[in-house]
Each structure stands twice: as C-alpha cells, then as structure tokens.
Amino acid sequence: MSYFESRLKVDFDNFNEIRLKLEFCEKLGLKNLILEPKNKIRSIDSDLKSKIENVTALNIFFRFNLIPNSLHEFKKDLELFRAFPYILSVETQDKEIQLHAAKDSRIDVITFSEPEIIKTITPGVISLASQNNTFIELALAPILVPKNKTIQSKNFRNLYRFVQFSDKLKGNYIICGNFDDIYDLRNPRALISICNTLLGMPLNKAKQGFSDNIIKLLEKVELRRDKSIIETGVRIIKGGDQK
C-alpha cells in the first residue's frame, strides 16, 4: 500500500528549501508528497512545477489553503479558484465558513490542523462533508510537536474526540503530519501506528487516512479538470448520435 504525507508547507520562492525538504522526505522513505505554498500565491508557475517534479523521485502533488477571516472574504476568495487544478482546502475557526465550505464543490478539504481549530469541529460539518464528498483533515503535529507543552494533553483530548466523530465520515477523511520543521517529519507508517495506539483509531481506518482516501481526493481533483464532466456521474459524450 502506498502512503502519503498530504501536507508539507514550503516556500515557493525558495527552491533550495524545497529541494532540501524533498531530499529529507526521500531519506525517510516517503513515496508520495503533497506540497502547500507558505506564500500567498494563486497559481504555480509551470516551469517551477516541472523543476520541483524533476528534482525528486517522489510523486509530487499540490494543494492550496485558504484562511479567510469572514464568510464574505471566503466567498470572494473562492471566485479566484474556479476550475482549480489542485487540491483546495480551507482552514478556519468560523463554523459558518466551515458549513459553507462543506457544501461548496470548489472546496476539497476542510482542515482541522491547528489546536484552536480542531476543537471547533461539529457533527453538522462532518455530515455535510460526507454528503458533498468534501474531505475532513486531521493533523498529528499538535500532539507530537505541540507549540505549548502545557496544552499537549488538551490537544490529545480534542484529537481523540475527532477520532470518535470519524466513524460518521464514511471515508471522507484524510490524516497528515503537518510538521513545520523537517526534523519532526515521520514516515506515514509511524503516524499510522500513533493513530492506532494513542488515538484508538482502528488500524484499517488509520491506513485509509494516509492512503486510499487521499487517492480518492486526488481522483476528485482530477475529475474537476475533465471539462466533459458537468457534475458527479454526468459526462458529456461527444458524437454520441453519430453513426
């Protein structure tokens, strides 16, 4: 089974940093990696994309993350991402934005990667996400490398609560490390074990969060690029009436 680190933030203006992080990921035994720009850019230069893909043996994918301050700002940002060719996620404590994102087909992932955001997750968001094929993302960095040691146990409780909710996600969840420092990075196999032993997540569900579900997410994004598909399950077939 092929596993992913589905969220590694890099500076797209610093190719040396990108190269060093990719080299480190290779040494860890990673095979699949999804990069997210730290800097606020709206697209990836094709030359840079090729340069990144050619400098490593890793399978490289890309994602962008929105951090809106209001629902109005979120809706305005979304207008810039129509037919977006990469994974698009949103990260916010605002429950109104979370609910709107769960219903909007342009959003692929609602990420609960930061401690203050993890605690805002609700059954309503999970239910809407499952209905609309939007993925919910959990990150393990808050319990493995907490910014504040005194709240590590609180982070753990919130993540454990998330795991209890995950039974209702019907496969629409992914798990990432989301580590800022490359020396905190772990092979997904180690993170799967942590999900299983510390958070009580069944082993098969933990594996799906690092593999099968991410593949489904990437397939969803790939379908969005296909202009012949007008909605899920509906494709325009050219020349269908020709004999």
Image (cartoon, helix red, strand yellow):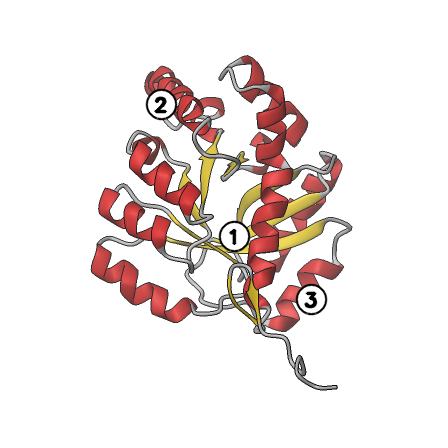
Q: Secondary structure at mark 3?
A: helix
- Determine whether label 1 and label 3 are within 8 Å by CB: no
Q: Position of residue 156 (x, y in %)?
A: 40, 19
Residue positioned 55% across, 59% down in the render: 233
Mark 3 nearby-residue class (10 Å; few <14, some 14–19, many ≥20): few
Residue positioned 68% across, 37% down in the render: 3
- Look at label 3 and name its amino acid: Ser
- Residue for badge 2: 158
Q: Position of residue 75 (x, y in %)?
A: 28, 63
Left or right of 1 in this view: 157: left
Mark 1 to mark 3 CA distance (whole Å): 16 Å
Residue 121, visible in the rendered structure? no
Considering only order in the chain, which callout, 2 or 3, is on the residue closer to the N terminus? 3
Between 164 and 113, the one nearer to me in the picture: 164
- Look at label 2 and name its amino acid: Asn
Between 10 and 93, the one nearer to me in the picture: 93
Residue 36's disc is 1
Left or right of 70 in this view: 153: right
Left or right of 66 in this view: 37: right
Residue 215's disc is none
- Residue for badge 3: 50
